[in-house]
Amino acid sequence: MINKVASSVAQALEGIPDGATVMIGGFGTAGIPNELIEGLIAQGAKDLTVVNNNAGNGDAGLAALLATGRVRKIICSFPRQADSHVFDALYRSGRLELELVPQGNLSERIRAAGAGIGAFFTPTGFGTELAKGKETREINGRHYVLEHPIHGDVALIKAERGDRWGNLTYRKTARNFGPSMAMACKRTIASVHEVVELGALDPETIVTPAIFVSQIVQVERQATQAGGLKKAA
Amino acid sequence: MSMTYSRRTKDQLAARVAQDIPEGATVNLGIGQPTLVANHIPPSREVLLHSENGLLGMGPAPAAGQEDYDLINAGKQPVTLLPGGSYFHHTDSFAMMRGGHLDICVLGAFQVSARGDLANWHTGEPGAIPAVGGAMDLAVGARQTWVMMDLLTKQGASKIVRECTYPLTGLACVKRIYTDLATLDVTPHGLRCVDRVDGLSHAELEQLVGLPVQA
C-alpha cells in the first residue's frame, strides 16, 4: 500500500543532508510552510542553498532558518522587504550569498527542472544587469536570454488537503510556488491541514498530482500572519 | 519659474491612469502608487485585475477584521476575489505576464528614457539591497507597459531622461508615462505630449523634461 503520510514533521524531514538545495514555497508569508521550516531547524542540516521568492519576513519561518547561519546561499527574486532585517544583516555582513533572479524566471527555472527542460530562452531581463554574462539570442526579431533550470534536493511546501498517495490542493494565493517546486525536487514534503481518504479530493480539482509528492504531514491550521508590509503610516 | 500650475495629487494621477483603461481590459497594477489606480476604475467598467502571486479577478481590500493573509496581492496586502475570479500557481501567473496575455501593466519608475527604457528596480547605490520581483517580467510581457510617477525627483531633475543612469528593468518597453504634470507617449519618433496640467505651457514642459517633446 502506498502511504506517504508521515507521522510527524520530524519523520517527514529525516535524512535531509548538509549541503542540500531546499526549495521553500511561499510568497511573503502566504504559503510559507512554517512547521516544516521549524522542523528543518530542529533537524539541523547545514550549508544549505535555499530557493524562495523572498528572504524571510520578521523573525519566524524562513527568517528563523536564515538566523541559524545554516544557509550558505539564497536564490530569490525579492529579498528586500520592510521586515527582512534578518536577511539584510546577513547579506550586508557577507555571510549569505544572494542569487537574485527575476520572479518569472525563478518560477520558470523551477518548472523547467521539473519538466526535464535543459534550458530555455526568455525575454525577461534582456539587456539588464541580471542577464550579464548569459547567452542571448534574437528569435523572430525579439531578444531572449538563456536561463537554466534550478534543481532541488528537497521541496518544503504548504498545501491545504492531501491524501495518502500525495495528491494536493492548496488554499487561495498560498498556492504560489508549491506546484512548480513539487516538480523540481528529488523529494517533496508537503504540510497539509487535512489528510483525506483516497477519492475524497475531486480529481478535477487536484492541483499537484501524487507523482510529484514524496511525503505529506498534517499540521494544525494557524492563521497566516501579515508579512512584508510597511507599518501603516 | 512662474508656478501658475499645480501638480496632480496621487489620487488625481491614479484617476488619470484609470480613465484610459478600457472596458474588458486585463490589467496588472504594480506595487506602490499603481495600486491606487484600482480605486478609480469606474464601477460601470468591468476590468480584470491580475496579481502576479496567482489571482485574476482581484477585488478591493477586505473590511477590517476580514483580512485573510492567504489572499494577498503582489504588495502582500490583503485583498478579496471577485465572483468569477480564479487562483493559479506562480508559473502560470508569469506565463500570463510574459506570454503577452495582459493588456496593460502599470508600473512605478525611478527613470524612463526617451526610448522607453525603464529603470525601477534598483538604485544601484553601494549597500543597497537589490530586489526585482516581477518587474522585469511585467515590463517586457504586457502588451502595453505604462509608467506612473512624478515627473521630477525631489531635487527637481527630470525622471524622463535621454539615457537611464539607474540599472535597467527592460529595454524600450514603456509606451506611456503618466506623471503629476503631464502625460507623454513614447513613440518611435520620440516623446509626444498627450496632456499637461492646466497652466503648464508646452515650452515649460519641454524645459522641465529637458528633451524635445512633440506637441
Image: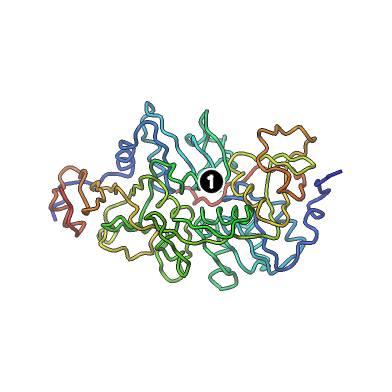
**Tag 1: Cα neighbours inside 10 Å, few (<14), some, or many (≥20)?**
many
The x, y position of residue A232, in whole percent, is 48, 47
Query: Relative to the observer, which residue lies in front, A232 or A68?
Result: A68
Foreground of the two, A38 or B215: B215
Q: Position of residue B58 (x, y in %)?
A: 49, 36
The image shows residue B7, relative to residue A118, as above or below, that is above
A192 vs A38, nearest the viewer: A192
Q: Position of residue B116 (x, y in %)?
A: 30, 55
Identify the secondary structure beneath mark 1: loop
Q: Quadrant of residue B68?
A: top right
Of the residues shown, which amino acid type is indicated by label 1? Asn
Residue at the top extreme?
B44
Q: Residue at x 76, y 62 (%)?
A: A16
A180 vs A60, nearest the viewer: A180
A11 lies left or right of A171: right
What residue do we see at 31% from left, 37% from top?
A: B20
Residue for badge 1? B53
A47 sits left or right of A103 in the view: right
Left or right of residue B147, residue B99 in this image: right
